């Protein structure tokens, strides 16, 4: 099965299943739900979905949805991999092949 990400690009792997409850037990909400003040400091957010600001094709927010996910998710997992090597960091570990 080939998936389309809405940008005309076909993908042969699945979307990632994100376990929000599990992650919220491990890190602060502000890590993902963020708003920034005029000085670039993270001042938290209202808990809205990532796609509310990060769209498939960047508009007002210069970081696309895919880039935001990869920066946040993969970046955090790579940083924490020294503590827990079971964390997925490679594409195929999160984006599973479709049967």
Image: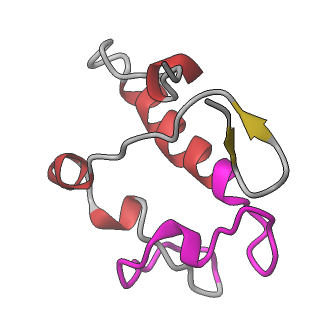
Is residue 90 visible in the rendered image? The answer is no
Residue 56 location (% of width, % of height): 72, 62
- Residue, x 43% and y 80% (percent of image)? 43
Splitting the image into 4 quarters, where does residue 65 fall?
bottom right
Residue 11 location (% of width, % of height): 70, 34
- Residue, x 42% and y 31% (percent of image)? 77
Q: Left or right of 36: which side holds 34?
A: left
Q: Left or right of 81: which side holds 71?
A: right
Position of residue 40 relative to residue 66, above or below, is: below
| Magenta span contains residue 48 | yes
Work out which quarter of the rendered image holds the N terminus and state it: top right
Position of residue 17 relative to residue 94, above or below, is: below
Q: Nearer the viewer, residue 1 or 63?
A: 1
Count the marks. 0
Q: Nearer the viewer, residue 59 or 27?
A: 59
Position of residue 46 relative to residue 51, above or below, is: below
Which color mode does the image show? Answer: secondary structure
Q: Left or right of 71: which side holds 63?
A: right
Q: Nearer the viewer, residue 82 or 73?
A: 73
The region drawn magenta spans 39-67
Residue 30 location (% of width, % of height): 36, 67
Q: Nearer the viewer, residue 84 or 60?
A: 60
- Residue, x 32% and y 12% (percent of image)? 85
Q: Magenta region, mostly helix, strand or loop? A: loop
| Magenta span contains residue 59 | yes
Is residue 65 visible in the rendered image? The answer is yes
């Amino acid at each position: 099965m080939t998936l389309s990400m809405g940008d005309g690009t076909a993908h042969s792997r699945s979307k990632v299943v994100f376990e929000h409850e599990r992650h919220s037990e491990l890190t602060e909400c502000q890590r993902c739900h963020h708003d920034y003040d005029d000085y670039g400091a993270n001042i938290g957010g209202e808990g809205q979905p990532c796609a509310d600001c990060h769209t498939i094709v960047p508009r007002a927010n210069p970081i696309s949805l895919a880039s935001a996910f990869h920066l946040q998710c993969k970046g955090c997992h790579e940083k924490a991999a020294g503590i827990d090597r079971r964390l997925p960091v490679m594409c195929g570990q999160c984006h599973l092949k479709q049967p």
